[in-house]
Image (cartoon, grey):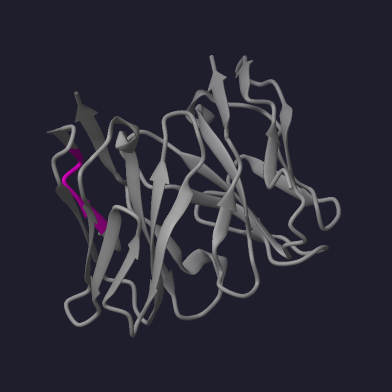
Amino acid sequence: KNQVEQSPQSLIILEGKNCTLQCNYTVSPFSNLRWYKQDTGRGPVSLTIMTFSENTKSNGRYTATLDADTKQSSLHITASQLSDSASYICVVRGLYSSASKIIFGSGTRLSIRP
Amino acid sequence: NAGVTQTPKFQVLKTGQSMTLQCAQDMNHNSMYWYRQDPGMGLRLIYYSASEGTTDKGEVPNGYNVSRLNKREFSLRLESAAPSQTSVYFCASISRDQGEQYFGPGTRLTVT
């Protein structure tokens, strides 16, 4: 069973609309959770990072939330733009710093239509 | 700073051929990683190097070898390429303080 599950797998919305992407994880013990944006043909780029004690963090039009009790995170995109078309990857890091404790979700592919 | 660089960007190999993927970072990071990304799957760790002179296997190391040449460079070698190794390969390095990973642009490898 995957330790980081993302939903939906893909999403299409109109430019200017809002959307929310979901991430459920089972990684334990937990250190931090990141959301990455990956444009087609490029490497992932970090959007936000949250530790166990943080509930919400914003980066411009991107707002991430974390519920450590239910092991759920969401990424909310406000007033979407065409440039938001990308894959969004949830990454959870286990408490101990071994590289094998960095677990990647399979991503949500977001398409913004004009 | 260039960040993390990878060469080549694209490569086509025949089954059985060998090649080395190069990665370099200029951020003075200690830890470096090689991942592969396949459709519908999350990035999977092939090998990592926690510091210069050390390397460790990740989740999917079979068919690969690595060399941590110095603090800047971490190469991935395919000794005898197989079609199952068709994938996009990403190199990453990690900052000590917050553990944020910085990724290279990727190498798209096709094995026929």
Establish if B78 lies above or below B56: above
Residue visible at 33% across and 64% down?
A58
Q: Quadrant of residue A29?
A: bottom left
User: Residue B75, image x and y in percent?
Assistant: 74, 43
The foreground one among A96 and B102 is: B102
User: Residue B29, image x and y in percent?
Assistant: 72, 62
Residue visible at 21% across and 50% down?
A78
| Residue A113 visible to an observer of this rendering | yes
Question: In the displayed structure, does residue B17 sit left or right of residue A74?
Answer: right
Which residues are the magenta region? Answer: A5-10
Q: Is the magenta stretch mostly helix, strand or loop?
A: strand
Q: Please state, as top left, top right, bottom left or bottom right, where the C terminus of chain A lies in the image.
A: top left
The foreground one among B13 and A96 is: A96
User: Residue A87, image x and y in percent?
Assistant: 33, 40
The foreground one among A59 and A35 is: A59
Q: Which residue lies furthest to the right in this view?
A: B70
Establish if A82 lies above or below B14: below
User: Residue B84, image x and y in percent?
Assistant: 48, 29
| Residue A25 visible to an observer of this rendering | no
Q: Is residue A34 magenta?
A: no
Q: Is residue A8 magenta?
A: yes
Question: In the displayed structure, does residue A62 sit left or right of residue A47?
Answer: left
Question: In the displayed structure, does residue A76 sit left or right of residue A62?
Answer: left
Q: In which quarter of the image is residue A59?
A: bottom left
Residue visible at 35% across and 82% down?
A52
Establish if A102 lies above or below A9: below
